[in-house]
């Protein structure tokens, strides 16, 4: 290796001056150095400081894995970077002194004079827009489906590209739109949301473009439109599939020319917003049926992001439930019993997170003690008794074979398996724990994770 110790020291002191946490690794995944920001953020005090990570492998430190990430079902940026000889970025869940966190990891090869790769510099950017632990606000999630979505959000956010959010109702499209805004350079300017449902032609124009004083009866003052209010920021058009054809033309004109006029005004104004649009409809099908303009569809569909349904991210339900409980109920000590969490995870949620949130809110209002039970949830669920039957363990409905779509990291497999087990009729922690060879406390802790 033609890379001297003094060159390595030079590299480290250069990295010390950079604000983001960075580590240097060799091709064998060993951490050979960490910059000041890394030491501050990750190697904390108490755990032996930076000395405790030097010489150890990155996958042991960040994932507590015994094999490299790519052998544990995750993509490994070091491996990808090595294969392609270029920088690679992936989103990972990392163990940190604060618990598990989403981290945007970028690995860049370092070459010697002969152009051979000798080290890799890994940059770790903390993701502010989502939490993998219960949180009082923002997006929470840790399932693969959620991570795939989050990775797309973080990639597109810094660009100006239009984002199209496609997903069932209640999957968090507005929250995702806000995350795009927060992760973009426009975060200090307004985020303006417009619901396109029920917009008439007149309303659309005056709401979006504003109007001049006296433009029509009742227009006593000049009014700023939402496009103007969103200037410098992000305009979120929710339920874009509901926009009538006449308004689709107007929106297309705005997007293509980047200009508009207030109702009753003569000045042409320049729009400056980043567009995020969302719909639960199949826009492509609407185009086929000529209910949505093809040209507008292509203009909007620059960067589509699928917001996963709860059925696609079932393992996130206990985490979401704990977060939503924090949001709707501020009484100290309020929590779900393990059976309640398993009951929530085993149910079908057509209304997705919104339905989950509403049910939790009803259950908190109807519960007196600190603990919310599965029986209480079943009582307040409005599905004709099917839920109660499941909670009491007398009804069918739970599939009796455990299946996974393909290889999964073992920690995820365990989580899925436990959630599935607990969702079976009659399952309870007391009888399951000995069958699984763990204590009740351990099982409870695993279910809360
Ligand atoms: N990942 C998430 N973490 C925490 N809360 C979430 C998450 N996603 C959605 N929520 C919550 O779920 C509810 C529904 O979300 P939101 O209104 O953004 O959904 P939507 O997809 O825009 O729905 P619709 O299509 O009906 O407009 C909100 O209360 C939101 O705060």
Image (spheres, grey):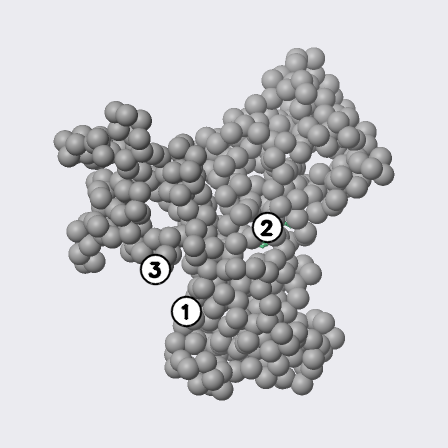
Answer yes or no: disc 2 within 8 Å of ligand 1: yes
Q: Residue at x 30, y 54 (%)?
A: 61
Query: In the figure, 256 relative to 158: above or below?
Result: above
Residue corresponding to mark 1: 332
Residue corresponding to mark 2: 172
Q: Residue at x 31, y 56 (%)?
A: 60
279 or 20, nearer to the observer = 20
Residue 419: horizontal and vertical position, in percent? 53, 71
Q: Quote the CA–CA distance across marks 1 and 2.
A: 27 Å
Query: In the figure, 7 relative to 367: above or below?
Result: above
Q: Is residue 357 visible?
A: no
* Earlier residue among tags 2 and 3: 3
The answer to which image quadrant residue 193 occupies is: top right
Tell which tag, 1 or 3, sits nearer the viewer: 3
* Earlier residue among tags 1 and 3: 3
Q: Quadrant of the N terminus?
A: top left
The answer to which image quadrant residue 25 occupies is: top left
Which residue ends up furthest to the right in the rendered image? 289
């Amino acid at each position: 290796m033609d890379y001297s110790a003094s060159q390595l020291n030079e590299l480290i002191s250069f990295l010390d001056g950079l604000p983001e946490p960075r580590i240097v690794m060799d091709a064998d995944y060993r951490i050979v150095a960490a910059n000041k920001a890394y030491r501050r953020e990750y190697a904390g005090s108490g755990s032996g400081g930076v000395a405790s990570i030097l010489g150890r492998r990155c996958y042991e430190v960040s994932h507590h894995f015994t094999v490299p990430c790519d052998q544990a079902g995750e993509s490994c940026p070091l491996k990808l970077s090595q294969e392609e000889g270029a920088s690679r970025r992936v989103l990972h869940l990392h163990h940190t002194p604060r618990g598990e966190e989403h981290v945007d990891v970028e690995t860049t090869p370092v070459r010697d004079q002969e152009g051979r790769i000798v080290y890799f510099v890994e940059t770790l950017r903390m993701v502010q827009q989502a939490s993998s632990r219960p949180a009082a606000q923002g997006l929470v999630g840790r399932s693969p489906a959620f991570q795939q979505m989050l990775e797309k959000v973080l990639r597109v956010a810094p660009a100006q590209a239009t984002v199209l959010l496609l997903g069932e109702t209640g999957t968090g499209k507005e929250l995702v739109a806000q995350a795009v805004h927060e992760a973009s350079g426009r975060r200090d300017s307004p985020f303006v949301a417009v619901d396109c449902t029920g917009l008439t032609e007149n309303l659309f124009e005056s709401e979006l473009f504003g109007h001049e004083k006296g433009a029509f009866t009742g227009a006593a003052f000049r009014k700023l439109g939402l496009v103007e209010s969103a200037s410098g920021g992000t305009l979120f058009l929710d339920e874009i599939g509901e926009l009538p054809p006449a308004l689709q033309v107007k929106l297309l004109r705005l997007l293509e020319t980047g200009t508009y006029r207030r109702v009753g005004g003569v000045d042409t104004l320049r729009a400056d917003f980043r567009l995020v649009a969302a719909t639960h409809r199949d826009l492509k099908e609407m185009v086929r049926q000529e209910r949505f303009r093809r040209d507008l569809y292509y203009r909007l569909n620059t960067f589509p992001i699928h917001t996963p349904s709860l059925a696609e991210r079932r393992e996130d339900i206990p985490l979401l439930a704990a977060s939503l409980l924090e949001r709707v109920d501020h009484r100290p000590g309020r929590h779900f019993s393990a059976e309640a969490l398993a009951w929530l995870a085993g149910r079908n949620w057509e209304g997705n997170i919104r339905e989950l949130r509403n049910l939790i809110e009803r259950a908190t209002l109807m519960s007196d003690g600190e603990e919310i039970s599965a029986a209480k949830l079943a009582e307040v669920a409005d599905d004709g008794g099917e839920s109660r039957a499941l909670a009491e363990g007398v009804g069918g409905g739970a599939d009796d074979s455990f299946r996974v779509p393909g290889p999964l990291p073992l920690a995820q497999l365990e989580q899925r398996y436990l959630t599935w087990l607990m969702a079976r009729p009659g399952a309870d922690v007391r009888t399951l724990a000995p069958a699984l060879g763990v204590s009740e406390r351990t099982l409870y802790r695993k279910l809360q994770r």
